[in-house]
Image (cartoon, rainbow, N blue to C red):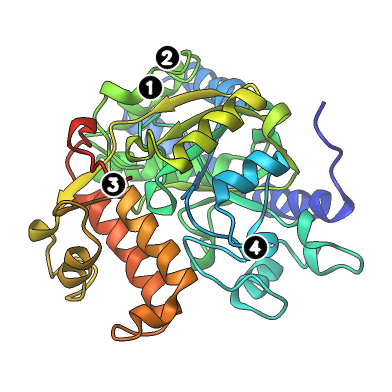
Amino acid sequence: MSHPLTNAQQLAIQHIGSYARARKDDAESIIQEVLAMSNIADVTLGQAIKSINDHARVALHFHPDRLNSAKKSIAEALLEEGVYKSQFETLLSNGSVSAYPGGQRDVWEEQLFGGAYQTEGTTNAERPKYGALNLMLHPDGPAPRFGSCYLLLRPHMTSRCTFTYMDSHQGPEEKGTLEEFSLVLAALLQDAFQNEYALGERELTPGKLMKHLTSKLSFPLQDPSDRLVRRNLNHYIEAQVHSVVSLKEDTEALVADPSFQETKTGEALEQLCRRYDIRLYWHAGFALDAAEVPSDFRGPAMPSLARRIAVNGRIDAYAIGAAAAEVARNPDAWSDRGSAKDMLQELKLLWHVLVRYGTPYNINLRSNNK
């Protein structure tokens, strides 16, 4: 049984639902126009919506080897605590590190959720956890920019979420809940119609999107290890999870980066999957020779940083995480490049480079030093 929602969590979901409901007519007009232009029957739309309601899952991306304030890795903390925590609890982020009263995240959450989490007595544990709706079923997840691994939540958790089309901190107008999804769906269909591109999928027409939603979401989770990663850095439906996220009760699978196999972090991931009865998969991963890191994607500092952290001349999720842990433990050793905050930001950007340009990880090339 899922934990009951708190008053703040219910208010947040209700606020987004009311917002979307008030704009539903405009959204429905866009949807009907796209359907008509694409020769898609209303019954097909109904089937797609039912499939989303019944089968869509939310993915929570994370880097398992980042250290929390107690200098424990996220993987170790998940193993010990059995719950996935919000940024307000961990003070860690793969986006904006501003989860504190009066910080940027606090301000935009107040605007986004109508002040629900600023009501008296609300705790940090009640705050939303951020993920992405896993509609296209990419093996590296719907939003790999936010982490090399992801937890896939059970379908019942999707009703405990609110959604924004793209990143919430940009203040998108397209928001909704599972019950009031028209604004988000309209934006998705409009992208597919106008650009033939949406959610990291090229040549995606509205017809192809409807076929995918009606036929693929109900499939059992496929082993992602031999499927091509999709490298979708920028286009996703963000999900805000307004609930306790229990590994035991609410989590169906963990999809991890193969660079963590046979490492301390990988062992912790395997243990937590055994302890909380979670299916474990490994996606194909990313690896890149340091010499091939470009200087015109995420800035000119990337090549020198890659050379500095490379293991046997290449970078992968493990190498970037090891460098992040070293920065946390011994920031003075990196002072020639900047502050610890600056370095963690650079490493986050290097991860984006790796996702964009990396080739599938090959376990046979892993360093023996791990």
Residue 6 % position (x, y): 87, 49
How far apart, in angstroms, are the residues tagged by discs 3 and 1? Answer: 43 Å
Residue 162 showing in the rendered view: no
User: Which is nearer the N-term, disc 1 or disc 4?
Assistant: 4
Q: Using residue 116 as the reference point, say whether residue 345 is left or right of it.
A: left
Q: Marks 2/3: CA distance?
A: 45 Å
Closer to the observer: label 2 or label 3?
Answer: 3
Among numbered discs 2 and 4, the one appearing first in the sequence: 4
Does residue 73 appear left or right of residue 10 in this picture?
left
Q: Which mark is residue 212?
A: 1
Tell me if residue 135 can be seen.
Answer: yes
Res 10 label: none
**Which of disc 1 and disc 3 is earlier in sequence?**
1
Amino acid type, callout 4:
Ala
Q: CA distance from mark 2 to mark 4?
A: 45 Å
Gap in angstroms between the C-alphas marked 3 and 4: 25 Å
Label 3: which secondary element: loop
**Label 3 neighbour load within 10 Å: few <14, some 14-19, many 20+:** few
Q: Nearer the viewer, mark 3 or mark 1?
A: 3
| SS of the residue under disc 2 | helix
Disc number lying in front (1 or 4): 4
Q: Give me the disc on residue 70.
A: 4
Label 1 vs label 2: CA separation?
Answer: 5 Å
Q: Give the labeled residue for mark 3.
A: 369
Left or right: 150 as drawn, with respect to 4: left
In the figure, 61 relative to 273: above or below? below
Contact check, label 1 and label 2, Cβ < 8 Å: yes
Residue under circle 2? 215
Q: Residue at x 55, y 52 (%)?
A: 73
Residue 206 or 162: which is nearer the viewer? 162
| Local secondary structure at mark 1 | helix
